[in-house]
Image (spheres, grey):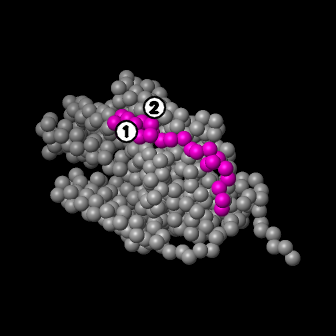
Amino acid sequence: MTDKRPETRRSLVLIAMVLSMFMAAIEGTIVATAMPSIAAKLGGFSLYSWVFSSFLLMQAVSIPIFGKLADLFGRKPVFIFGVVVFLVGSILCGFASSMGMLVAFRFLQGIGAGAVNPVTTILAGDLYTLQERGRVQGYLSSVWGISSVVGPLAGGLIVERAHWAWIFWLNIPLGVAAIVLMWRYLHEDIRHEKRSIDFAGVGLLLASVTSLMLALTESSSWGLGAAGALLAVAAITLTLFIRQQHRAPDPVMHLELWRNRLIAPANTATLTAGIVMIGLISFLPTFVQGVLGSSALVAGFALSAMSVGWPLASVTAGKLFVRMGVKKIVRTGAILAAIGAMIIAFLAEDGALLAGIGSFIMGVGLGLLNTTFMVAIQSSVDWTRRGVATASNMLMRILGNALGAAIFGGVLNYHLGNVLTRNGIADRVSLDSIQDLLGGGAAHATTLSREMLDVLRGGLSESLHLVFWGIVAFATVTLIISWLVPNLPKEAALPADGDIEIGGH
């Protein structure tokens, strides 16, 4: 009697991948709109930023770990584990009764997202040929762009029409559907091998990234001495992590991948592009509303222009990948990202329309870069290393997001503080008051004179332009690094040994 292995249904597995990635991606944007209302109910404004940082931090730390586990134990069990953890965290977030509890549960959500994100991207490399891979990665990449438009709108609607907990609980049907589809329709052959986890490496990586994030996000409140100590801890633990990876029999991150002529510059450019992306997403709406005086809807338009350009470029990159090669697409994307950043830095004060144009051009550039880098990296290694290679690139993108948010947030707060001191109003108006005012807080608007409002608006404009020029600087660095990325060798277009056998579509 012949034991026939069930067929993998690629189309249904792809739906599960899209659902899970959308679930994780939208969680980074939907909370932003609702957080003022949530914080007003739960209290604890001092922990406000950590609601975002905790989620991002745990993703950055856990992505390389789960990428390794996906290579050792298979994609399906790691994917299902990640979705379950994410859903548990989501349910608990909805029941949080304090900001401290919410931050803790967001850590749990981040761990789940750290498993979901790399496995979905790895599966795209397993299930599809090189010719198909670019198109599929374009679909997955566009999920992030769509979530950045849908998330803020959905968050606002939920807060206005229902209890804020539904911001987290709406993940439940998406996650359950993804688990069912992946459980029933993905079938993979797992090679039996000796498996080990580098727990020392995991701990050192966690310590290093956590120390770095604390230094960047809390330096203004803890002081330069504490920030310097944390940076020293981050440097020491990173050095120990690298040493551990060289001697561990089965390391978390295969550092030899960074000797690859394609992977090293691609991952470095992904890091700096991640800084560029988060800078635009975080601060362009603030400029449109706080400086230009436009509505939230106009600010949404300016930012959503990037979200339109990104998926269009991602799909285009997938179609042109084999014909044009890595080098041409990457260079084009880096040039467009730099042009978009320059438009925003130079012309943003002339109106929201030009800000939207710059946002769109930058989105096109980042979409070309993101999809091309991911497909090229996956195609440059075999199946057994595709998980760690994919995870290393995703780690660079999310770490870039985390670093960018901390760097640009620090620049903004530091310069605004100087403006308050320079104008002699630091004892009457705090940075929190400025943030409430720019968010439309009527209470602050009625207690501040027009002269003070003009000072604040001018200071905000100066500060945000410093941020925009910082974005230009990192976009320029991305352009320089992208020029070093080579084309794939021709043999990379051949199917890799060990890929999942596909029996259906």
Label 2 neighbourhood size at 10 Å, few (<14), some (14-19), many (20+)? many
Callouts 1 and 2 close, C-beta under 8 Å: no
Choose top left, top right, bottom left or bottom right for residue 45: bottom left
Residue located 45% across and 37% down the image: 483
The residue drawn where x is 62% and y is 57% is: 123
SS for callout 2: helix
Tell me the residue that label 1 is attached to: 477
Residue 470 placed where, x, y %?
Answer: 32, 38
Asked if residue 477 lies left or right of residue 1, the reply is left
Q: Amino acid at mark 1?
A: Val
Query: From the viewer's perspective, is residue 453 above or below residue 376?
Result: above
Q: Taking 3 as reference, is 230 above or below it?
A: above
Q: Say which of 460 and 127 sits in front.
A: 127
Residue ID at (60%, 35%): 324
Query: Does the image show residue 367?
Result: no
Q: Is residue 137 magenta?
A: no
Residue 489 belongs to magenta span: yes
What x and y, as percent, mark residue 498? 66, 62
Secondary structure at numbered mark 1:
helix
Q: Is residue 84 above or below residue 263?
A: below
Query: In the image shown, does 180 or 47 lie closer to the viewer?
Result: 180
Can you name the residue that lies furthest to the right here? 1
Amino acid at the residue labelled 2: Ile
- Determine the residue located farthest toward the top in the rendered image: 350
Disc 1 to disc 2, C-alpha distance:
11 Å
Q: Quadrant of the N terminus?
A: bottom right
| Mark 1 or 2, nearer chain start | 2
Apparent side of residue 141 relative to residue 293 in the rendered image (left or right): right
Report the residue marked by disc 2: 335
- Span of residues in magenta: 471-498
Residue 83 location (% of width, % of height):
56, 64
70 sits to left or right of 341: right
